[in-house]
Image (cartoon, rainbow, N blue to C red):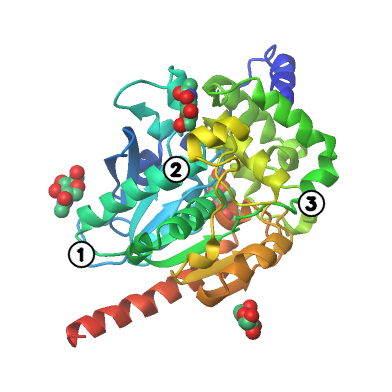
Amino acid sequence: MCWVLFLFSIFSYFSPILSIDQECYMTVPEIANHFGYKSEVHLARTKDDYILELHRFPCAKNQQTCSSKKPAIFMQHGLLSDGFCYIPNMPEQSPGFVFADAGFDVWIANSRGTPASQKHVGFGPEDQRFWNFTWEQMSQFDLTASVDYVLRNTSQDFLYYMGHSQGTMIMFARLAENPEFGAKIRQFHALAPVATVSHIGGLFQLFGKKFLEYVEILLGRLPYTPLSIPKTIQQIISFFCSKFIMQDICTLDIGFIDGNEKQFNQSRVGVYLCHTPAATSVKDLQHWVQLVKSQKVAKFDYGIDGNIIEYGRSTPPEYDLSKIQTPTYLYWSKDDILADTQDIRETIWRQMNHTIAGSLEMPHYSHMDFVFGVNAAQELYPKIIENIRKDFDGWRKSKIHGF
Ligand SMILES: *[C@@H]1O[C@H](CO)[C@@H](O)[C@H](O)[C@H]1NC(C)=O
Ligand SMILES: *[C@@H]1O[C@H](CO)[C@@H](O)[C@H](O)[C@H]1NC(C)=O
Ligand SMILES: *[C@@H]1O[C@H](CO)[C@@H](O)[C@H](O)[C@H]1NC(C)=O
Ligand SMILES: *[C@@H]1O[C@H](CO)[C@@H](O)[C@H](O)[C@H]1NC(C)=O
């Protein structure tokens, strides 16, 4: 937050003429229309009364009508992101559009707290109660409501799931807690997967171990508030971050990636930063800090007394990944400092050994390259498309033959 204020105080004296692509000012459905894709907005209501927007691209480019007998793919964004992360680049590079063109029914989710999903039946985002959530509730309520909505609306029994970062965590947690939900998920494609975060070494190298304590103290002072940046400030940041020298810091493209391995479209960085970071709750970040410290995959820790009230035990319950039965595909990179390879090996790989259907190491991908990188459309998405097609065709044939 400091650098945000710092940038703002320096640059608020200028009146920058923003030379950023117009997608900066558009919503996800508007961007889709802009690039020639039909888009729909759907609303799903969660059990705890949040209203979430789902964005759908039912057809390929420049089609207004199309068959509904397609595999549905459900795309779930990560922390401080929203549905925009699936359409950040040109159509032939952005996963949302690549899958639509490949014959998928594309559904893009927006978790509670993101700009598209800041509605609740009982109170608005100005109320503290609105921001009383972490990824745990996204997993328990948002994911289930959104997936059920898609299955109802498409009259299908299952869908294919693609999650990035925190978007993999909420699925791991759901499948671990109620495996019967797994019957609705035909395949789970996990981009930059995170479960435990014990080894996010890169962050410590950058900021030092004390950093975590400061963050925890700081966050503890702001419970039940949104973590977001006002739109005007975000646009100013986006302008200055689009300047070459600032890009690495602004996009968190830090760690071990060399300059010549960069995968962001440099001239789009301004657009990325108009939409990212998207809002979430301070409590969500607190939960992540707890996981780094505890080295576990557990529910939110309210302290001993709070845990007894909330869970009837002194420590928060842990998620048991070995309960997961859904075929899972992992896509990861040694250069990703957040989804650390050692964490993936020691937790996901070990506990889910029997249900890992595939694993693909990506060369020199930073954490955001899985969605923002321009190479993924050649190196990554075709692999996912192939796996799903094979499965879907097999399923269709078996149905025809009456199995
Ligand atoms: C937030 O949720 C927790 C857990 O359900 C509850 O104990 C607490 O009272 C809630 N706080 C607010 C401000 O709503
Ligand atoms: C799906 O949603 C659309 C738009 O809200 C609606 O028109 C349509 O009837 C729904 N289909 C089903 C099967 O519920
Ligand atoms: C980068 O984005 C611009 C639009 O901002 C686009 O015109 C250009 O083709 C993109 N470059 C690459 C390499 O994809
Ligand atoms: C899964 O576990 C078994 C036994 O522990 C081991 O032999 C096998 O190599 C593991 N498979 C993978 C893919 O790690």
Q: Where is residue 390 in the image (x, y as percent from the top left)?
A: 38, 80
What amino acid type is highlighted by mark number 1? Ser
| Residue 311, x across and y down, in percent | 50, 40
SS at circle 2? helix
Ligand 4 is found in the corner quadrant, namely bottom right
Alpha carbon separation for disc pair 1 and 3: 47 Å
The residue that disc 2 covers is: 138
The three-letter amino acid code for the residue at tag 3 is Gly
Q: Is residue 186 left or right of residue 66?
A: right
Label disc, if present, on residue 122 of the rendered structure: none
Give the Cα separation between the discs numbered 2 and 1: 31 Å
Q: 380 or 220: which is nearer to us?
A: 220
Residue at the image point whose x is 60% and y is 62% from the top = 375
User: Would residue 57 appear left or right of 164 to someone viewing this image?
Assistant: left
Q: Which of marks 1 and 3 is nearer the N terminus?
A: 1
Q: Name the residue under label 3.
A: 201
For marks 3 and 2 on the same chain, the one whose residue lies earlier in the sequence: 2
Q: Which of the 4 quarters of the picture holds residue 100?
A: bottom left
Foreground tag (1 vs 3): 3
Residue 132 visible? The answer is no
Q: Residue tagged by mark 1?
A: 67
* Local crowd size for mark 1, using a 10 Å CA cut-off: few (<14), some (14–19), many (≥20): few
Closer to the camera in the image, 165 or 363 = 165
